[in-house]
Image (cartoon, coloured by chain):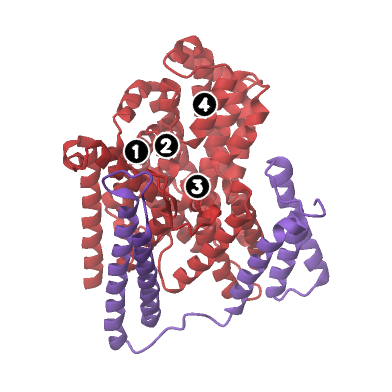
Amino acid sequence: MRRADAVAALVFMSLGGAALYQTTLFDQTLITDNYLGATFFPRMVAIAMVIMAISLLWGSRKTLTEEGDEKTMFGPGILRPLAGAVIVGVYSWALEPLGFIISTVMLNVAILLTFGVKKIPLLLILPTTATLIIYWVFYKLLTVPLPEGIFFL
Amino acid sequence: MIDLLVQGLGTALSPQVFPFLFFGVMGGIAIGSLPGLTATMGVAVLLPLTFGMESTRALVLLVGIYIGAIYGGSISAILLKTPGTPAAAATVLDGHQMASRGEAAKALSISAIASFVGGMVSTIMLISFSPILAKFALRFGAPEYFALAVFGLSIIASISGKHPIKGLLAGMFGLLVATVGLDPVTSYPRFTFNQMHLYNGFSIIPVLIGLFALSEAFVQMENFRVGSKIDTNFKRGIVSLKETIGLLPTMLKSALMGTIIGSIPGAGADIAAFVTYNEARRSSKNSKAFGTGCMEGIAAPEAGNNGVTGGALVPLLTLGVPGDAVAAIMLGALIIQGLQPGPLLFTQNADVIYGLFASMLVGNVLMLALGLLGVKLFCRVVEIPKRVIIPVIITLSVVGAYSMNNSVFDVWVALGFGVIGYLMQKVEMPASPVILAVILGPMAESNLRRAVLMYQGHYDFLWSRPITVLFLALAAISLFSSWMRAKKERNV
């Protein structure tokens, strides 16, 4: 786990460093507030982030030498959340062209498949029912606009 | 005043008005419990339905939704670790821990009772002390807002558990996320990389949904075993009378704080929930138990966020200044109904206003009744097999993220923060500080800069204004006590 801390520290250090660099590119010429300006707050936050990341890295370095065992960060089921993230990504991309109903049924089927559901009736009934209920609640009952897509569904 | 209130009670309980209140509260609970649908959205969505209604019915319906939705957010926060509204983000910390160890019914009942206490206290304060509260709220300038935000942010140290440095890093990440978009004072675009979508910054709802709902769904997917369900033991039942009495001081204090925070324009239920949680933890003898599933950790934010419901109406009704986003929509509703907010409202339209006050009292009783009666039903959600509930959570998360601005970009934001939240869980980094910082960061920055502008580059406001000094002192005490506690824990 300490190795994970070290990786996290390096990620935050890079993020803080990148943010700090970005603030040097702020070119505020049109409207200025004369005192703290648009740069002050993000710069302070970025500096604090880098300092804390260094502190975390230092701490992880100390404990890394003290603790021999490393806990595994990802379990054997890591492929499922990875697949989940990809499915949601594809869904976000397909939502507007395909419309809410078709894309949401497909999203639910895909996630059920990642859980190893193979029974066809379950794969048909569950996603369709869940999608139609959510559609009815949001679109019909609460009049929340949802993408219609090219099929107007 | 008592006569008018009794008359108002008659109106609230009349067959012409009561059904509107009942459906408002019930609908509000349902809306609040759906991730992504906030109280503001619920009230906004139903506003057009009230255009043709009689004034009292219209206001009662909207107020019912407001009260119900603020409470409803805690249901999904406790059961699914997915706050229905940003105001319920603080409730996740202890609520879901309790649910995970089989005390979902107890957690839900505490939430209902605390929300009831918060709502009742704030309504009584609204009825009795509106002018005084309005005067107090008017004393809040930029320095006070800045100090309030700092006090709220000081909670980061105390909600970071065994790894305060990781909590602080998460908080810094949240503050950085909050700076994306147009600068609040000069409108200079920061970290936007010429992307139009980033000009308004990240909306809080997709960030919240990603960090809490999607990340949790990903973790559950990873740990999934066939036939697995969340371990539940609902036989432990709801909170006992003795426990409720024990929680009463926390609830009352949080309710009062929530009312005061609600009466300050711009400080809403989400801020109140975190501030009251922090204060409850700071002053509790049982502070170590916070974050591990302690009852006070639910009672404080729930009483605090429902305390806002009455508080937010104080400046609205007395001055015509809305206390939060819902109050702003209520202002629109009042004007549509031909009512002009301000001191004259209490004399010229006393029947409508006292009908509204009485309806708020009745609405809170209804919320308590529906909340307690619904505990068993709500708990059934946790018993649904994971492979059924997870796709539903993901779908609700995506729809919730999309529906805020009807934007697919927000769905991408939710997904991005979902992955970030998942990775944060892997390195044992808490997600709550990110949300807290995203909510309070803009308030802290813009008010600090306004205060410095007001004082022409000087920082006298930090020690010359009593309310500012009070909040900054409380923040310092909070940070110091968290540091001492962490030190003690390390030494044990």
Across and down, in percent, residue B242 comes to: 39, 46
| Amino acid carrying mark 1 in the image | Met
Task: Tell me the chain of label 3.
Answer: B
The chain that appears purple in the image is: A
Q: CA distance from mark 1 to mark 4?
A: 23 Å
The chain that appears red in the image is: B
Across and down, in percent, residue B422 comes to: 50, 69
Q: Mark 1 or mark 3, which has the lower sequence index?
A: 3
Q: Nearer the viewer, mark 3 or mark 2?
A: 2
Q: Mark 2 or mark 4, which has the lower sequence index?
A: 2
Q: Residues within 10 Å of mark 4 (few under 14, many from 20)?
A: many
Residue B257 is marked as 1
Q: Mark 4 or mark 3, which has the lower sequence index?
A: 3
| Residue B19 seen anywhere in this rendered image of the structure | no
* Location of mark 4 (residue): B331
| Amino acid carrying mark 2 in the image | Gly
Q: Out of B166 and B65, give the one closest to the viewer.
A: B166
| Amino acid carrying mark 3 in the image | Ser
Task: Tell me the chain of label 2.
Answer: B
SS for dot 3: helix
Q: Mark 1 or mark 4, which has the lower sequence index?
A: 1
Image check: B400 left or right of B274?
A: right
Image check: B396 left or right of B271?
A: right
SS for dot 4: helix
Q: Out of B240 and B483, give the one closest to the viewer.
A: B483
Across and down, in percent, residue A151 comes to: 82, 54
Image check: B231 left or right of B94?
A: right
| Amino acid carrying mark 4 in the image | Leu
* Location of mark 3 (residue): B109
* Labels 1 and 3 positioned on one and the same chain: yes
* Location of mark 2 (residue): B307
Q: CA distance from mark 1 to mark 3?
A: 21 Å
